[in-house]
Image: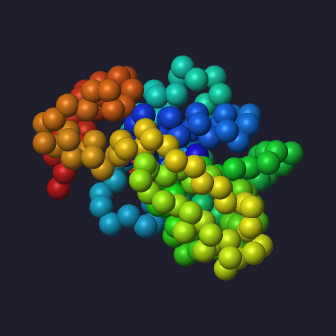
């Protein structure tokens, strides 16, 4: 499961658990992005985002975390992560889970053609976001990936990282939107209290 996770919240965790059970996955590996090449805002340091994900997943034996993207040099390109995972899990089928909003841009990702041969995709949508148009169009235009991109709606994704950052900046409560250890970590380090 790839994402910036700035910060991780219950929407991400519910999406991961739903994907695991619906697609019969052996485990879900969270891979926080290192330096995202596509962001126009300042992103919290990779090591802090990694730490927040780590603190969120301790109670689920099917969840794991990888520091692959945060320890490698240079920008995070998904194609490189997938090449690495393909080698590491050579006897396994891979599914790359992320937000459908992010997947909509997939054809513009670096080495998109290769990416589409390395894994299947699971796009998690927010409630009210109709992913069927995107899924139909991409599969019509790229018959080679037909059946390799799956979508599912996650009601808990009404929670968003953007909203959480905004709430913290405005001094509003974020209790119950993310795991308590993450909320306390954010409080302790005063993350998101001031964005400039
Ligand atoms: P983003 O643009 O920050 O997020 C787009 C939307 O997807 C947001 O609504 C976001 O909600 C949601 N989202 C992101 N990750 C999610 C997840 N794991 N589960 C459910 N919803 C999720 O996307 P991003 O986080 O930067 O990128 C997502 C993944 O795509 C990462 O692994 C990234 O490396 C990859 N990617 C690769 C390339 C490339 O290789 N060129 C380019 C773009 C993205 P929240 O804000 O609430 O998370």
Looking at the image, residue 54 lies above or below residue 119: above
Looking at the picture, how far across and down is residue 161, in whole percent? 34, 46
User: Which residue occupies the extreme bottom position in the image?
Assistant: 141
Q: How is the image coloured?
A: rainbow
Looking at the image, residue 77 lies above or below residue 151: below
Horizontally, is 145 left or right of 168 in the view?
right
Q: Residue at x 45, y 27 (%)?
A: 55
User: Which residue occupies the extreme top position in the image?
Assistant: 59
Q: Residue at x 20, y 31 (%)?
A: 173
Q: Residue at x 25, y 32 (%)?
A: 174
Looking at the image, residue 151 lies above or below residue 181: below
Looking at the picture, how far across and down is residue 7, in whole percent? 37, 41
Foreground pick, 134 / 91? 134
Looking at the picture, how far across and down is residue 180, in whole percent? 35, 23
Foreground pick, 98 / 69? 98
Total numbered circles: 0
Looking at the picture, how far across and down is residue 125, in whole percent? 49, 52
Foreground pick, 19 / 161? 19
User: Which residue occupies the extreme left position in the image?
Assistant: 171
Assign the C terminus to one quadrant of the image: bottom left
Task: Confirm whether residue 194 shows in the render.
Answer: yes
Horizontally, is 43 left or right of 108 in the view?
left
User: Which residue occupies the extreme right position in the image?
Assistant: 91
Looking at the image, residue 182 lies above or below residue 44: above
Task: Confirm whether residue 67 shows in the render.
Answer: no
Horizontally, is 124 left or right of 196 in the view?
right
Q: Residue at x 68, y 66 (%)?
A: 115
Foreground pick, 61 / 191? 61
């Amino acid at each position: 499961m790839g994402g910036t996770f700035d910060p991780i919240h219950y929407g991400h965790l519910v999406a991961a658990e739903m994907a695991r059970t619906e697609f019969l996955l052996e485990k879900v590996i969270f891979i926080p992005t290192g330096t995202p090449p596509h962001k126009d805002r300042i992103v919290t340091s990779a090591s802090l985002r990694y730490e927040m994900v780590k603190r969120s997943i301790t109670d689920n034996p099917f969840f794991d975390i990888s520091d692959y993207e945060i320890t490698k040099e240079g920008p995070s390109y998904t194609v490189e992560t997938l090449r690495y995972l393909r080698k590491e899990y050579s006897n396994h089928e891979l599914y790359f889970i992320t937000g459908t909003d992010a997947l909509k841009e997939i054809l513009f990702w670096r080495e998109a053609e290769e990416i589409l041969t390395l894994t299947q995709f699971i796009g998690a949508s927010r409630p009210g976001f109709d992913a069927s148009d995107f899924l139909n169009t991409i599969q019509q235009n790229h018959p080679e990936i037909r059946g390799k991109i799956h979508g599912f709606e996650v009601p808990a994704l009404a929670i968003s990282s953007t909203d959480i950052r905004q709430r913290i900046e405005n001094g509003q409560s974020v209790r119950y939107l993310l795991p308590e250890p993450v909320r306390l970590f954010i409080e302790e380090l005063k993350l998101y209290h001031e964005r400039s």
